[in-house]
Amino acid sequence: VGFIHGVLNTDNVTISGETIDYGPCAFMDSYHPATVFSSIDRQGRYAYVNQPGITVWNLARLAEALLPTLSDDASNDDKAFEQAKTIIGSFRARYEAAFHDGMRHKIGLFSEQPGDLDLAAELLDLMAKNGADFTLTFRDLAHEVDGPGPARDHFIDPTAFDDWATRWRQRLDREPEHAGERAVRMRRINPKYIARNHRVEAVISAATADGDLGPFQNLLAVLSCPFDEQPEWKEYALPPTHEERVLQTFCGT
């Protein structure tokens, strides 16, 4: 869903595998793999694309602390090291399998065929080159299963999307599901509403400057049903204007 933790260091990842203490977290508006928001991340260590690798690094630090407990033979450090190395080494393949499965589903491919991952990767590349909104591009793909729809409007060069969409629809023709059923499933996977940075900034400002929690309550209500259409709150789905963009977030958030 385009979420960036912001400070994905060792003390913000629990042994149960969950991340905590998000601080300067944010959701991407326009997609780019190198997106960073945190004011303290000046070198992109915790950029969107780096999150899997940082998780591996964090696991390695945990393994170092646990090495004395991993082997029955306390004097055999090599055995413990190899055991930890094998476990950590399995993360990348498991993560990629889960990520690729999720990406296939986001573009409406619920069976697996050769070339699917290339198709998904091509879309992400086009989105990065054309400033396409991460959330709304995937959401609007559900309208594209039968023919041209609103997804192309998120691209600086809509014709770049058109070429990809032609090949994508050809692939959809080999799916067993009816187009309507597929669109419903895609909307259950791709949210319409996220906690967009400019909305978060607005509710914080209203609460702290004016003591008004109304905007926060409204935003919370919308985000409680992120996959529903909610036409009465449709403005909350819109990406920020150029002037509204929030490019930096802080731990205090």
Image (cartoon, helix red, strand yellow):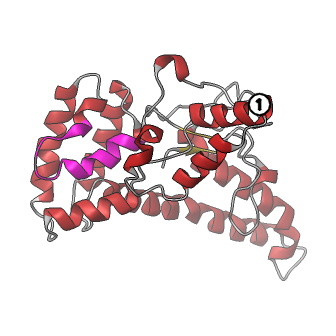
* Number of numbered labels in the structure image: 1
Who's the residue at 52% across and 16% down the image? 243
**Residue 197 image offset from top left, x and y in percent:** 59, 34
The residue depicted at 21 percent of the width and 34 percent of the height is 161
- Along the line of sight, the residue nearer the viewer: 146 or 210: 210
Q: Is residue 153 left or right of residue 234?
A: left
Question: What are the residue bounds of the magenta stretch?
Answer: 135-151
Residue 148 highlighted magenta (yes or no): yes
Does residue 109 appear in the picture of this structure?
no
Nearer to me, 45 or 251: 251
* Tag 1 residue: 210
Q: Quadrant of residue 172?
A: bottom left
The residue furthest top is: 243
Q: Amino acid at mark 1?
A: Asp
From this view, report whether residue 97 is shown above or below residue 240.
below
Q: Position of residue 46 (x, y in %)?
A: 65, 38
Mark 1 closeness class: few <14, some 14–19, many ≥20 residues within 10 Å: few
Q: Quadrant of the C terminus?
A: top right
Left or right: residue 103 compared with residue 203? left
Q: Position of residue 19 (x, y in %)?
A: 70, 56
Magenta stretch, main secondary structure, is helix
Does 141 appear in magenta?
yes
User: Quadrant of residue 165 in the image?
Assistant: top left
Q: Residue drawn 31% across and 59% down? A: 186
Residue 137 appears in the figure: yes
x 60%, y 31%: residue: 36
User: x, y percentage for residue 221?
Assistant: 57, 54
